[in-house]
């Protein structure tokens, strides 16, 4: 009888090998240009778009954190189902506009689009800075998540740094070799993989322990009914407020819509129909959270408790005596969730730095070839920086991430103004972004100043809109032909 | 007509935003009745997600049948390209 951790390691190694193979081969079709490397020559079809969008949003946090919430805070976790969908739905309408403007003017990033619209290099640099500050801790969290799962299922034999290194060495190789095509096709493989693993375990575990999903929920309804309804409980176990629950949905939804790497994938789509159909099918990906909820709820009445709520998934898998191969598959599924988010972010962070910061400020004459090379170098540097942060976790990653995320949310009024409000000006958008971000940051660190206990992001957004409107009114409008050309391009059907 | 269909689809998501937050969620944030084995509050979420697929699919096929008008005037009807500005 081989020891369990050896089997687990072998299964995971097999999964990593397939990921690498898929990622390596897929890059052969890309042209050797920045558009090829960053936007896949704008040739992504429906299958790849669906999994890029879906798997990209399902991070290690979704795979471990959401079940952790369901386990410890009950109905509070339902908010993830709502905001994921509400955040993506606008892309059915917004996506084709973004893609048309991208095709016409040759954009591959969000900042390129917005800085062209408002004719401002400052805006470009500002957006790039905010994006990268948000990406690095996010990638670090993904790496740490991968390492932790590997560590848990091998009973501590594989240290966290080694697990993270193994997974992200593979990611680095296919991102460098194949660019966004590597990200796209591996996400497809990883997405299918984690869907299958999650549904299989999510249906099997409640059946094995309680005789079915319905029976499990009936028993929880008798013993812990407070866990089955929103707004659920807060982190201390006290009832959570409806205000906090609702505003969390609103702010998270706006934030999801504005993530720069999501924007970039709209540029990669083959045509308008591909984007629209991706959004038609996208909600089905949200249902992927259901089996994860089932596993988490199966832990509620289970005799032993995990060391921390976030460990509920590995804990349930390890304490129900499933075959070592299944443990390995589960571990690979968690790695897939982590890698399919981490690869897109790594690739996006490097592309954004080069396209929106480096060539705008440091080297205006950098050619296509030079930029492609620099994106690869930057990807390695971002990877190393994130790995360093992931392994030396004395800094509060979540706090850093939430702060930067607050700033990402503030891009929403600028994007809306870009497509709808001709009178908006560069000083207006910059002032709005700064005011919104700073107010959000301030209220995040000093919650006692929040008016009526509102979510800090909502307050920031309101002031952002107000500033954007006021400053735009007071400044010189952009030349009309320029604005008209942009807006008309976005509305023109392909 | 197209703009009405688009508005209806957007209306679905506005309705959803209300139905899954305060106060629209209040009457449905309950454990019973169980549907498909799920507590009602969870089933409520799943139902809105499935409805979203249907709403967006309906919109997609509607727009597919009527190309060229995306609910807004085509560019030539409203603003001429920049070169025409200022001159008759």
Image: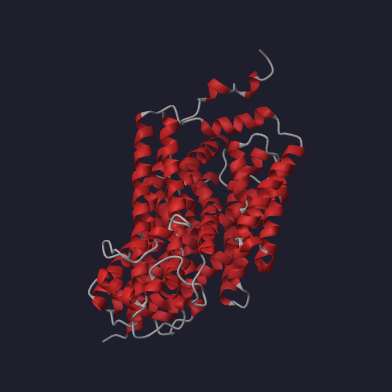
Residue in the image at 31% along x and 69% along y: A202
Q: Residue at x 38, y 45 (%)?
A: A280
Q: Which percent across, then down, holds residue B37? A: 27, 65
Q: Residue furthest left?
A: A211
Which residue corresponds to the image point at 40% horizontal and 28% vertical from the top-left?
Answer: B67
**In the foreground, B4 or A58:** B4
Q: How many marks?
A: 0
Query: At 47% across and 57% down in the image, what residue appears?
Result: B21
Q: Is residue A181 left or right of residue A122?
A: left
Q: Quadrant of the N terminus of chain A?
A: bottom left
Can you say whether A389 is above or below A420 in the image?
below
Of B72 and A389, the residue lying toward us: B72
> Relative to the observer, which residue lies in front, A80 or B67?
A80
Q: Position of residue A116 (x, y in %)?
A: 65, 39
The colour mode here is secondary structure
Instruction: Give the vertical position of A339 relative to A43 (above or below).
Output: below
- Image spot of residue A240 (x, y percent): 50, 69
Q: For the view shown, which residue lies furthest in the front direction?
A: B27
Q: Position of residue A378 (x, y in %)?
A: 61, 59
Instruction: Judge left or right: residue A13 versus residue A433.
Output: left
Q: Quadrant of residue A327?
A: bottom left
**Residue A30 appears in the rendering:** no
Residue A161 visible in image: yes
Vertical relation: A6 (above or below) A51: below
């Amino acid at each position: 009888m081989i020891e369990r951790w050896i089997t687990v390691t072998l299964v995971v190694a097999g999964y990593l090998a397939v990921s690498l193979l898929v990622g390596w081969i897929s890059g052969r079709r890309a042209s050797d240009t920045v558009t090829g490397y960053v936007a896949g020559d704008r040739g992504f079809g429906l299958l790849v778009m669906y999994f890029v969008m879906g798997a990209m949003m399902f991070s290690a946090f979704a795979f471990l954190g959401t079940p952790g919430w369901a386990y410890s805070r009950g109905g509070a976790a339902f908010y993830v189902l709502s905001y994921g969908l509400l955040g993506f739905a606008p892309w059915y309408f917004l996506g084709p506009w973004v893609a048309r403007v991208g095709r016409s003017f040759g954009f591959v990033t969000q900042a390129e689009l917005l800085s062209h619209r408002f004719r401002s290099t400052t805006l470009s640099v500002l957006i790039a800075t905010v994006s990268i500050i948000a990406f690095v801790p996010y990638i670090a969290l993904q790496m740490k998540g991968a390492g932790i799962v590997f560590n848990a299922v091998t009973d501590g034999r594989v240290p966290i740094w080694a697990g993270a290194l193994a997974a992200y060495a593979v990611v680095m190789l296919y991102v460098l070799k194949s660019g966004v095509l590597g990200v796209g096709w591996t996400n497809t493989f990883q997405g299918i993989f984690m869907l299958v693993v999650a549904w299989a375990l999510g249906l099997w575990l409640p059946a094995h322990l309680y005789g079915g999903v319905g029976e499990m929920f009936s028993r929880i309804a008798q013993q812990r009914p407070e866990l089955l309804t929103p707004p659920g409980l807060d982190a201390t176990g006290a009832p959570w407020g409806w205000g906090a629950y609702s505003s969390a949905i609103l702010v998270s939804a706006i934030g999801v819509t504005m993530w720069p790497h999501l924007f970039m994938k709209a540029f990669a789509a083959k045509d308008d129909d591909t984007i629209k159909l991706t959004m038609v099918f996208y909600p089905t990906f949200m249902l992927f959270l259901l089996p994860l909820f089932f596993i988490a709820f199966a832990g509620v009445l289970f005799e032993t408790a995990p060391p921390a709520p976030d460990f509920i998934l590995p804990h349930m898998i390890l304490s129900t005596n499933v075959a070592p191969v299944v443990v390995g598959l589960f571990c690979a599924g968690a790695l897939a969730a982590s890698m399919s988010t981490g690869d897109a972010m790594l690739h996006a962070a490097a592309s954004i730095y080069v396209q929106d910061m480096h060539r705008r400020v440091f080297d205006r004459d950098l050619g296509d070839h030079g930029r492609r090379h620099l994106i690869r170098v930057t990807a390695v540097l971002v990877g190393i920086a994130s790995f360093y942060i992931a392994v030396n976790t004395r800094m509060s990653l979540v706090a850093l991430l939430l702060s930067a995320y607050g700033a990402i949310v503030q891009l929403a009024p600028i994007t809306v103004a870009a497509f709808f409000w001709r009178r908006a000006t560069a000083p207006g958008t910059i002032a709005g972004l700064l005011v919104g971000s700073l107010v959000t940051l301030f209220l995040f660190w000093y919650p006692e100043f929040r008016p009526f206990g509102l979510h800090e992001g909502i307050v920031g957004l309101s002031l952002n809109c107000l500033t954007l409107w006021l400053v735009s009114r007071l400044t010189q409008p952009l030349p009309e032909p320029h604005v008209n050309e942009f807006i008309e391009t976005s509305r023109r059907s392909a | 007509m197209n703009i009405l269909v688009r508005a209806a689809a957007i209306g679905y998501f506005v309705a959803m935003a209300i139905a899954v937050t305060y106060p629209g969620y209040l009457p449905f944030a309950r454990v019973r009745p169980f549907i498909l084995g799920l507590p009602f509050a969870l089933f409520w979420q799943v139902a809105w997600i499935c409805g979203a697929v249907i709403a967006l699919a309906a919109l997609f096929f509607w727009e597919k049948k009527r190309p060229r008008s995306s609910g807004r005037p085509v560019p030539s009807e409203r603003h001429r390209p920049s070169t025409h500005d200022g001159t008759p």
